[in-house]
Image: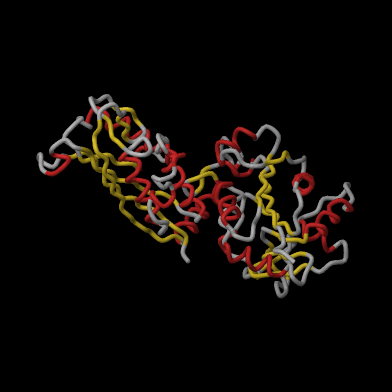
Amino acid sequence: MGQPRTAALIVAAGQGLRAGGSVPKQFAPLAGKPMLAHSHAALSAHPAVDEVLVVIGEGQEEALAAALGPVPFVIGGATRRESVRNGLEALGDVDRVLIHDAARPFLTAAVIDRLLAALDTHEGSIPGLPVADTLISAAGDLVPREGLMRVQTPQAFRYATIMEAHRDWPTEHEATDDAQMVRALGHQVAIVPGDPMLEKVTHPADFAAAEARHAASMRVRTATGYDVHRFAEGEELWLGGVLIPHSMGLSGHSDADVVLHAITDALLGTIGAGDIGMHFPPSDPKWRGAASARFLEHAAGLLAAEGGVIDFVDLTIICEAPKIGPHREAIRASIAAILKLPESCVSVKATTTERLGFTGRGEGMAAQAIATVRLPQG
């Protein structure tokens, strides 16, 4: 028998009114990117997850595209239960499904591993944490906390079972979670250790607490990138994604953008992912004349898939001509746009070699980049 096929549903159809702000909370910025992007990256990067489907509210298509780009999605319903049902019905041939709330952004691979392993012996599994606080009722009576758990998501199920549970559930009643519906069929649902990082973001103050949790869980990495290209007649000069007027351009297999190549290598270095030539071989004709922004976006995507956040990019362009000063801000703005960073997180400098070496002789240009990022611990 082959490996079970696993899908993940991210429920992101709510309006997030309690969180305040001008956009639903799942699309609000958190730790450097839209909240939804964190769990989507974690699920997409997990080797056991074959597909990820996002359930959004009607009219949220543009917000989803801005947050994640072109990804599979389905429109949800008036309640969470209806939204999950719509997502389940839209899935293809799968054996297992993870159902996750977008409001729990910091999902770890270890939690996913525990949930899926429990499906070997159970129809469903959920992550939970013991209740540590003293509990009282609204009347002030003490509620024993022994045996109580705080339930989190994602919740994992055998697909046929959760589909049956949703189809059989009486529509006049709402379920607090999907595990409740599976228990109603008579099945036991395993409880695996959850993670404090999976706390739900609901109110405005929760954003600050989530930022703090995320920051505490990250480690800083710095890596450098360096690239060189020679000048050639009849070529265009692209620097940082900006076309620079000059009597000569740079020669290379792609558009020879020495600036973006150096930054790409720096980002790849932060996650130990080799260099630009490994990902885009010069021997491959499909990259002939390609825009180097594609290379940088690829490197940034690999970093994001590992939960990384770009904090700062520092760039030095080395040449005698053309003068970089008149184009510095345009180059800076272009790099920031490609990486989806504020311009304040990008530094562009230029220097000469006092007419020494190949750059001093005007034979070519060089660029050196340093990228500082944060990555999850582990």
Q: In the picture provided, is 123 more to the left or to the right than 42?
A: right
Viewer-side residue, 39 vs 321:
321
Q: How is the image coloured?
A: secondary structure
Percent of width and height locating residue 349: 23, 40
Q: What residue is rendered at 56% in x and 55% in y?
A: 45
Q: What residue is rendered at 29% in x and 47% in y?
A: 369
The image quadrant of residue 108 is bottom right
- Residue 340 visible in the snapshot: no
Percent of width and height locating residue 352: 15, 39
Percent of width and height locating residue 25: 59, 43
The image quadrant of residue 319 is top left
Percent of width and height locating residue 261: 34, 43
Instruction: Looking at this view, name the residue that lies furthest to the bottom.
Output: 146
Q: In the picture provided, is 35 more to the left or to the right than 10?
A: left
Q: Quadrant of the N terminus?
A: bottom right
- Residue 377 visible in the snapshot: yes
Viewer-side residue, 5 vs 286:
286
Depicted 20 relative to depicted 100: above or below:
above
Q: What residue is rendered at 82% in x and 50% in y?
A: 174
